[in-house]
Amino acid sequence: QTAIMVRTPAYRDPHANRIVFVNVNIFSTQMDYHGEPSILSLYPKTNSQKERESPEVLEIIDDQSASSSTASGSQASNRK
């Protein structure tokens, strides 16, 4: 079973004056009827206002492809 955690950059919620982080956990064994990965958690609780206001780069964590995750992570760090 491969677990992928994706943390997207913050975006401004069009229905409220706030910035929202989206935290999506995707598990390959849980699919909806279209065969797409199920979104298991959205909008994590955050106590830090600074964390909400500081967008983070996209991160994909995969145990079986650590080398590619490391490469993309270093590229993302260079873009900051």
Image: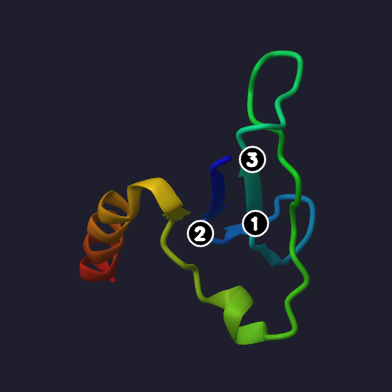
Q: What kind of residue is marked 2? A: Pro
Name the residue nearer the viewer: 40 or 66: 66
Q: Is residue 39 above or below residue 49?
A: above
Q: Secondary structure at mark 1?
A: strand
Asked whether, in this view, residue 77 is left or right of residue 32, the answer is: left
Q: Which residue is mark 2?
A: 9
Mark toward the start of the polypeptide (2 vs 3)? 2
Foreground label between 2 and 3: 3
Picture quarter with the N terminus? top right
The total of numbered circles placed on residues is 3
Q: In percent of the image, x 24 and y 65: which residue is there?
A: 74
Residue 31: x and y in percent read 70, 26
Q: State the image quarter where residue 75 is shown.
A: bottom left
Q: Which residue is mark 1?
A: 23
Q: Is residue 33 above or below residue 75?
A: above
Q: Are marks 2 and 3 in contact (CB under 8 Å)?
A: no
Foreground label between 2 and 1: 1
Q: Which residue is mark 3?
A: 27
Residue 48: x and y in percent read 68, 86
- How far is the residue under mark 2 from the one under mark 3? 21 Å
- How far is the residue under mark 3 from the one under mark 1? 13 Å
* Circle 2 residues within 10 Å: few <14, some 14–19, many ≥20: some
Q: What kind of residue is marked 1? A: Asn
Residue 28: x and y in percent read 61, 34
* Circle 3 residues within 10 Å: few <14, some 14–19, many ≥20: some
Asked whether, in this view, residue 56 is left or right of residue 75, the answer is: right
Q: Secondary structure at mark 3?
A: strand
Asked whether, in this view, residue 28 is left or right of residue 40, the answer is: left
**Colour logic:** rainbow
